[in-house]
Image (cartoon, helix red, strand yellow):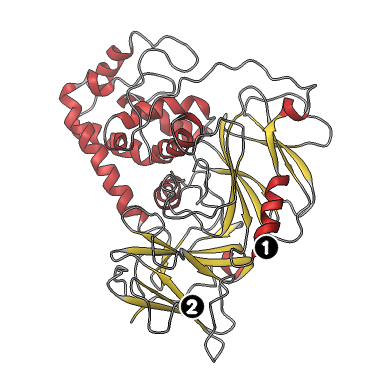
């Protein structure tokens, strides 16, 4: 869905030994405490607690995939240091594999922010001729702030994103956005009509006017405070399948200020070695419990795989993303969306019906051909624009195809309505007999389709509008 951190990013990391990021020495009694705590629980109880902890904390760890790829790993082709914005004038394609469920509608302006030393300034110009937004995402993947057409309007403004510990004075005229975490994801989306060369030119010019950077760069009279370098652990995708998941979790927890309710939940996991900033030793300290820990992780992964495919209410084969704020204490939806579409916009900004099945409940598969027809006057109700994007089930990435079309929507010039004013879109691996104009190509195997409604109207937000079903031909 975006290019920087991005959700949804997949992640894990090698064991985090010795000192934590602020240089504090690991607690020498950690192993003794870990073994003592383990003795109070049966293996079955440990397995269940591991499963619960993994499910609850999955978004925090998944978020690190993008952080690592975009701001930590200097050998990554996506690397750019913290607090520097990457402005991409290329739409996402199948070659982009760091973010699940990316959009193919907008140019991205992305950055990973480190707020520990000083606030980060975001300067935007007046924007009247198109949709744009800047989404601010906390370590737990909550959307805690927005700047843009739908949220703050079209006027030029200067914003400061501040850390949870910031209490200083900002320059006059600067609007504060308080972050709940010290590390923040920034995802800017700027609408572009790739079929219109003039619109492409205007969108690229707008991207150059966005400014993102540390406050002292824009306001030299506000110097940064000292901040210790962070000793980021390495990441390997396979580590999400084993106990190293919890090593990474312990490393990440100190950089976010959790709500009192969520902190209470995390405190319950101390019994299995989960504690902010501490080395994770529970697995090695308790050889007899290692099978239970491994089983708990396996069960959590299976639970997430299943749960994420049944997100929200199912209508006409579409999973309707939950309405309301993202995410607060809605931890189940937070995990589900981190799995299938991390960094999803909050519904008021953009809404995402998602189809894994046809109208009869059968899994969508490229060996069949399908269609979806919107009746006349009943296109997706968007204040700005809408689209359908195709993803492969096994990877949740865009699908390579002969016409290089990865999404289709109201800005697709080749798309034509039917004689009665309705609109039919064809989905499938084989080109439909109706031609390419209204065709969204699919892989040869299982696939899913995400609808994006930018600036959803009230009948979307109150649940009264629902998309028509996808029909197998």
**Looking at the image, residue 263 lies above or below residue 378:** above
Q: Is residue 183 left or right of residue 338?
A: right
Q: Position of residue 247 (x, y in %)?
A: 35, 26
Q: Position of residue 141 (x, y in %)?
A: 50, 42
The quadrant of the picture occupied by the C terminus is bottom left
Compare residues 231 and 211 and report the one nearer the observer: 211
Which disc number belongs to residue 199?
Answer: 1
Q: CA distance from mark 2 to mark 1?
A: 21 Å
Which disc number belongs to residue 210?
Answer: none
Q: Is residue 431 left or right of residue 184?
A: left
Q: Which residue sits at x=22%, y=34%?
A: 294
Asked whether residue 332 is in view, the answer is: yes
Q: Which residue sits at x=19%, y=35%?
A: 44
Q: Earlier in the sequence, mark 2 or mark 1?
A: 1
Q: Is residue 267 left or right of residue 197?
A: left
Compare residues 2 and 294 and report the one nearer the observer: 2
**Looking at the image, residue 73 lies above or below residue 348:** above
Q: Position of residue 83 (x, y in %)?
A: 61, 32
Q: Are marks 2 and 1 in contact (CB under 8 Å)?
A: no
Quarter of the image where one finds residue 111: top right
**Looking at the image, residue 317 lies above or below residue 243:** below
Asked whether residue 457 is in view, the answer is: no
**Looking at the image, residue 371 lies above or below residue 183:** below
Q: Callout 1 environment at 10 Å: few (<14), some (14 to 19), or many (20+)?
A: some
Q: Position of residue 464 (x, y in %)?
A: 54, 72
Question: Can you identify the residue that label 2 sits on?
Answer: 437
Compare residues 295 and 14 and report the one nearer the observer: 14
Secondary structure of the residue carrying tag 1 is helix
């Amino acid at each position: 869905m975006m290019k920087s951190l991005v959700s949804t990013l997949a992640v894990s990391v090698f064991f985090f030994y010795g000192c934590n990021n602020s240089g504090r020495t690991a607690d020498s009694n950690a192993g003794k405490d870990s073994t003592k705590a383990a003795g109070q629980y049966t293996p079955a109880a440990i397995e269940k607690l591991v499963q619960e902890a993994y499910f609850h904390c999955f978004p925090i760890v998944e978020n690190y995939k993008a952080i690592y790829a975009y701001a930590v790993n200097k050998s990554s082709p996506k690397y750019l240091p913290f607090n520097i914005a990457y402005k991409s004038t290329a739409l996402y394609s199948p070659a982009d594999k760091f973010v699940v469920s990316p959009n193919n509608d907008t140019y991205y302006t992305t950055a990973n922010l480190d707020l520990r030393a000083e606030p980060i300034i975001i300067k935007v110009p007046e924007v009247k001729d198109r949709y744009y937004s800047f989404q601010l995402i906390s370590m737990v993947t909550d959307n805690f702030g927005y700047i843009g057409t739908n949220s703050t309007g079209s006027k030029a403004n200067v914003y400061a994103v501040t850390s949870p510990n910031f209490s200083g004075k900002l320059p006059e005229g600067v609007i504060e956005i308080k972050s709940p975490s010290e590390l923040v994801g920034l995802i800017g989306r700027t609408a572009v009509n790739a079929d219109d060369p003039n619109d492409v030119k205007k969108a690229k010019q707008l991207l150059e006017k966005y400014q993102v950077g540390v406050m002292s760069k824009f306001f030299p009279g506000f110097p940064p405070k000292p901040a210790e370098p962070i000793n980021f652990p390495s990441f390997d995708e396979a580590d999400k399948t084993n106990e190293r998941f919890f090593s990474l979790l312990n490393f990440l927890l100190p950089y976010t200020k959790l709500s009192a309710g969520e902190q209470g939940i995390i405190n319950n996991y101390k019994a299995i070695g989960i504690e902010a900033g501490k080395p994770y030793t529970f697995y090695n300290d308790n050889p007899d419990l290692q099978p239970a820990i491994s089983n708990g992780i396996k069960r959590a992964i299976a639970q997430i795989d299943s749960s994420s495919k049944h997100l929200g209410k199912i209508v006409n084969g579409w999973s309707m993303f939950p309405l309301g704020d993202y995410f607060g204490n809605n931890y189940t939806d937070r995990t589900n969306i981190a799995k299938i579409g991390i960094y999803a916009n909050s519904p008021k900004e953009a809404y995402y019906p998602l189809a894994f099945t046809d109208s009869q409940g059968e899994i969508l598969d490229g060996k069949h051909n399908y269609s979806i027809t919107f009746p006349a006057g009943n296109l997706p109700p968007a204040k700005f624009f809408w689209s359908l994007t195709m993803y492969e089930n096994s990877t949740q990435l865009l699908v390579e195809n002969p016409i290089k079309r990865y999404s289709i929507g109201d800005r697709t010039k080749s798309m034509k309505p039917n004689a009665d004013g309705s609109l039919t879109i064809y989905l499938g691996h084989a080109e439909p007999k109706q031609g390419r104009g209204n065709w969204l190509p699919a892989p040869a195997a299982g696939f899913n389709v995400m609808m994006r409604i930018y600036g959803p109207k009230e009948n979307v937000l109150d649940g009264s509008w629902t998309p028509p079903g996808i029909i197998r031909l």
